[in-house]
Amino acid sequence: QVQLVESGGGLVQAGGSLSLSCAASGRTFSNYIAGWFRQAPGKEREFVAAIRWSGGSTNYADSVKGRFTISRDNAKNTVLLQMNSLKPEDTAVYYCAARGPAWVIPSDPSEYAYWGRGTQVTVSS
């Protein structure tokens, strides 16, 4: 059974940085895709970034390009999201997700089979 556990959320001022971590367990993830999504109150869950576990190719939402960086640590089965230049509109619960292989890295949350419980990120103005 795949388990994803997020950590690293918190409160930060606008312009600051936070790093989120997602610890994955339960299987070998070498051909999986892992992603980060977020959901603000009253809004739908939206794509943030995703990465192929093998090869490391990435996909980002336009709203975070140039500010957020997704990476993975194969030895620790961990996916990281480094968030810089944070804005109040980045405030949301951030979720880690994973799925099996795909030709194109998907941004639709319905394409991901496994989910963590989320971690709150709050950016104050």
Image (cartoon, rainbow, N blue to C red):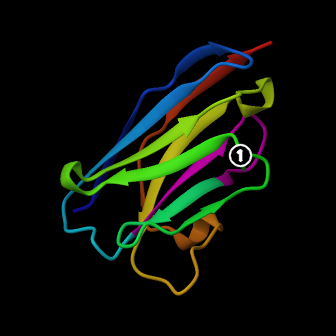
Q: Secondary structure at mark 1?
A: loop
**Camera-side residue of 32 and 40:** 32
In the drawing, does residue 57 fall left or right of residue 27? right
Q: Is residue 94 above or below residue 56?
A: above
Q: Quadrant of the N terminus?
A: bottom left
Query: What segment carries the magenta color?
Result: 33-47
Determine which quarter of the picture holds residue 39: top right
Total marks shown come to 1
> Residue 110, image x and y in percent?
59, 69
Secondary structure, magenta segment, majority class: strand
Q: Which residue is mark 1?
A: 66
Q: Left or right: where does residue 34 sit relative to residue 87?
A: left
Q: State the image coordinates of residue 17 (x, y, percent, origin top left).
A: 59, 24
Mark 1: few, some, or many residues within 10 Å (few <14, many ≥20)? few
Residue 22 screen position, x and y as percent = 37, 44
14 drawn magenta: no
Residue 45 belongs to the span the image colors magenta: yes
Percent coordinates x, y for residue 92 in the rendering: 66, 33
69 is higher (above) or lower (below) than 61? above
Which amino acid, mark 1?
Gly
